[in-house]
Image (cartoon, rainbow, N blue to C red):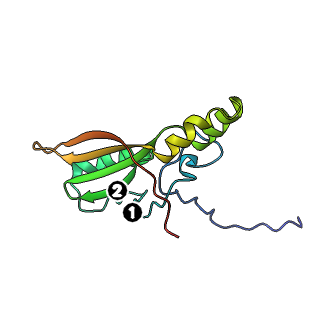
Amino acid sequence: MTRTPVVLARPVEPVAEAGPRSLVCPLGANCSCVFSGNRSTASTSFDATAPLHEALVADVTHFVDFGWTVTSSTPDEVVLERRLGFSFCVTVLLCLATGFLWLAYAIPSGRRPRIDTRRVALGADGTAVVTRTVARRTVTPPAA
């Protein structure tokens, strides 16, 4: 007989995390939003049970899997957003490699980031139509 107790139980299955996983940065799940402002209006998870047309669900889940956030949705249209640019980890590495000269680019682009907006709408023939807009916005600090 062994002195080590043997316990027979069902193994606990790991729960899948909601939201996208970043394969780019080994230090964090999404380090490009470490210092981003308050994102209380955007949701990072997509509810596929919402009353959307079936053609929209596949396209929107594809975008959400790649890190897009759902800003607003109606039964016929979904608006998705993401920030363009370098991640926080890449910016730190470039600052160290260039002797902090990279900050001349990083600070202004951090204050006015490029926001990529995709609007997935239902077309006249029942298919999903994706339109893209890229704009610069001023980041507002979170309310204290």
Residue 14, relative to residue 82: is it above or below? below
> CA gap, disc 2 to disc 1?
7 Å
Residue 141, relative to residue 106: is it above or below? below
Residue projecting furthest to the top: 98
Q: Number of numbered discs present?
A: 2
Residue at (54% x, 60% y) in the render: 15
Image quadrant for the N terminus?
bottom right
| Residue at image mark 2 | 71
Drawn side of residue 135 relative to residue 52, left or right: right
Residue 106, numbered label: none
Residue 41, numbered label: 1
Q: Quadrant of residue 47?
A: bottom left
Q: Quadrant of residue 102?
A: top right
Q: Position of residue 69 (x, y in %)?
A: 40, 52
Q: Position of residue 135 (x, y in %)?
A: 35, 42
Question: Do the residues under discs 2 and 1 have CB atoms within 8 angstroms?
Answer: yes
Residue at (64% x, 42% y) in the render: 26
Residue at (52% x, 47% y) in the render: 21
